[in-house]
Amino acid sequence: MPLSVNEQKKTGQMREVWHRLVRNKTAMVGLIVISLLILMSVFAPLIVSYDSVRETNAEEKYQPPSAEHPFGTDDMGRDYFARIVYGGRASLSIGFICVAVAMSIGLILGASAAYFSGAADSIIMRIMDVLSCIPSILLALVIVAALGPGLVNLIIAITISTVPTFTRVIRASVLPIVGQDFIEAARACGTRHPRIVLRHILPNAMGPIIVQATMALSQIIIAAAGLSFIGMGIQPPAPEWGAMLSNARTYIMTSPYLIIFPGIFIVLAALSLNLLGDGLRDALDPRLRD
Amino acid sequence: MSQPLLETKNLKKYFKTPHGNLHAVDDVSLSIEKGATLGVVGESGCGKSTLGRTILRLTQATDGRILYDGREIQACNESEMRLLRREMQIIFQDPFSSLNPRLTVNELIAEPIIVNHICENKAARNRRVEELMDMVELAKRLSNTYPHELDGGRRQRIGIARALALNPRFIVCDEPVSALDVSVQAQVLNLLMDLQERLSLTYLFITHNLSVVRHISSEIAVMYMGVCVEKAPANMLFSHPRHPYTEALLEAIPTPDLSSRNKKRKILKGEVASPINPAPGCRFAPRCTKATAACTENGGITFSEVEKGHFVACIHCC
Amino acid sequence: MSEPLLRIEDLWVRYQTERATNYAVNGVSLSLDKGENLGLVGETGAGKTTVALSILRLLPQKTGIVDRGSIWFDGQELLSLSQSDMRAIRGNKISMIFQDPMTSLNPVLTVGEQIAEVIMLHSSKTQKHEVQQRVDEILQMVGIPAARKQEYPHQFSGGMKQRVVIAIAIACNPMLLIADEPTTALDVTIQAQVLEMMDALKRTLQTSMLLITHDLGIVAQMCDKVAIMYSGEIVEYGRVEDVFEATERHPYTQGLFGSIPSLTGNVRRLNPIGGQMTDPANLPAGCKFHPRCPKCMERCKTEEPAVVDRTGHRIKCHLYT
């Protein structure tokens, strides 16, 4: 079957990108760390039960790490390890949802700005300019302040503040492709706009977009933690790394591990995503091909 | 004479720039007979590529008429245009940027067939793609490779197969061999000429290479700064060029034989002026050795027939 | 003079990448006398530019490896020179003109500054007015009014930029000028201007030139000797008269001439060379041209041909042994 050979070949090209990524050690470290964190969040119920996140125990407050509580216990005697595991669930899912939504909006806006140019381009990009004039964390803060704190509002706020960067990156990576002869060739045989964008433009523009998504993911995790830290994000008793960090401030002198563990995890998630993003950028760069 | 397949009448294409209108194509009237090849030569920036794209309505003409088989192209709406596009195709210069790097050879050639819903099922489509690959002498084993794995000559063959996929009658060849090495260039030229004979195609062949244009064309139009300065049957143009620019152009080609080695050449002085808001009168006047005051007067120059089939736009030649 | 200005002996260069080894130059020998023009002709990937870069020792550091050979220039062996000795030669005794005039000039420096830089680097002229005087002189030599030295490269047209590039190359009166496709990016009428100017300059400065090109027309017009390269080898070498007009020629040379549409004759079909350029990572055994050669014999497939020398006209082909 000719088709099945085609499919094989396609995966072959992806495999090439994969091989280049595997050769990059720092990127692989990033990939392994972020994969472990994702696995940890997805299979959280198998690791510890959610009950231990809520169960307060007045007698077991401020326990340093031990065999029973690997990360110790917090000011209410809750198992800190369980809270870290479930906190990761919150942080990572906020990250993924925000990136997915912001990227979809960015794809529509950025691709149409670049493809149709002219008035559409000016209008879309000026709106983005206005949005990005406000520092993104401040913008998110204003939105949360207006809508009230909470998980959904946090996601809305972060998404809105991330859209301009996505739109810009996507427009910039689509623009040089629009000018290429194969787009003209597609138009010359009567291809309609949606097919040109979906089949000819976007697959060729995906490289920088994927890199941007990875980088944005790490920024969003930090932003979410930041907003929760100042009490604008996820509300207690639900665990979240930023909120845990905020809560632990008071005990920094007496129980420093309470601030160290969430801190380490935020850094691990953000750093591993950045390393992976850098590696992906190199692996996808067509100039390094052959 | 039969009715021409394609005709342009006073075709104009201006681009707006911050400094004024850029006259890319200015008042060009040409016609191509069925089965013939009209070569368009000129140096970079003379508007020959814009002419090809304007004829295919890939950019909108500023003014003038384009008639394809007697039909007014400008008047077609989008769906009529889509049908017309099956008959008019284009082959590009750069075999690197004219092929989508994410598609295989098979997918690239099948794309126009899918878009225009020509074959009912996959099997018929694959048969058609194989037939086309055969036509352009591409080995079947290459059908699942990607363009970046192939050399320039093979890539250009993919571009030709894609253009042929819809059974066109008219093809704009925009510098199709300029990016290729001489030996491969000759292979592709032979292929294009064979295909023309077999499928009775009509070509508009755009190039800056004078020996190529003489080889492939039945008629040649010479362009300078958006204006067609001379048009004549290929042999006549080369044996008796009339326009001073054509003469200079022919003089400037280095020929691969030693007879002209120590001959003193007449070399054209100066460079092409800016095509933005050009001065009235003959565009070539500033570099022309025969230029007189009358050359720069407005409206003095007409594109007139000096001999049967030989048109020149120069007041000194008529 | 008995000793030629430039003599390359049995040069082998390969490019080593992680995936493959590309054998770019495979045993090239050539020589160039003082004041002579040598045309190096071949298609993409024949190794022309690699030869030029080897002379200047500008091969990519990690991947370009010279396996064997020696390059003698003006009594010195270039491949064994130290980096600093080599720097003193580059731009001074040997200079190079690149193909693309658009990218070989620095866009943020004026044309005059770029020429002055080379002069200050290599000559004893340190006084500002001396240098400026020389800049004016050189600009006039390449046909640019000296007043334009204050302008930036983007204010020049393609042909004018190439003149500036040539001005920089000749600023120190080099003994050898390497021109890598100097007019390929230019229009024919501009090309004719630039070639005429280079010819005149060569006569006044007595410079030798290695002209790399794929255009046999330019060779016919400019060169005294010509070397035809294929797959990193010189398959034919001799005076222009020999290579263009002799009856005994390498099949590849014949194929090249057969591929060019004539401006005068009336040939309906061209006689191109069949097939594609050989892959430098996977060279065929025997004669490297044999898979495409119309006159291929059995021995061509296994046995590498020797070079036949007919009073300076050298052909590497079994047909003539």
Image: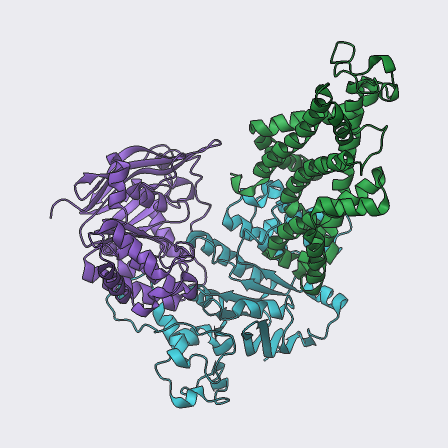
Instruction: Indicate the position of residue B205 as horizontal and vertical percent values.
Output: 53, 66
Indicate whether C256 appears above or below A83.
below
| Total residue callouts | 0
Q: The purple chain is which one?
A: C
**In this picture, residue B114 sits left or right of residue C321:** right
Display colour for chain A: green
Q: In which quarter of the image is residue C234?
A: top left
Indicate whether A56 appears above or below C271.
above
Residue pictured at 62% horizontal, 52% vertical: A172
Q: Along the line of sight, which residue is nearer the eye, A104 or A163?
A: A163
**In this picture, residue B265 sits left or right of residue B24:** left
Q: The cyan chain is which one?
A: B
Residue pictured at 69% horizontal, 48% vertical: A135
Instruction: Indicate the position of residue A245 as horizontal and vertical percent values.
Output: 74, 28
Instruction: Indicate the position of residue B314 as horizontal and vertical percent values.
Output: 44, 84
User: In this rendering, does residue B165 appear at all?
Assistant: yes
**In this picture, residue C293 sits left or right of residue B172:** left
Q: Along the line of sight, which residue is nearer the eye, B253 or A199?
A: A199
Residue pictured at 84% horizontal, 48% vertical: A146
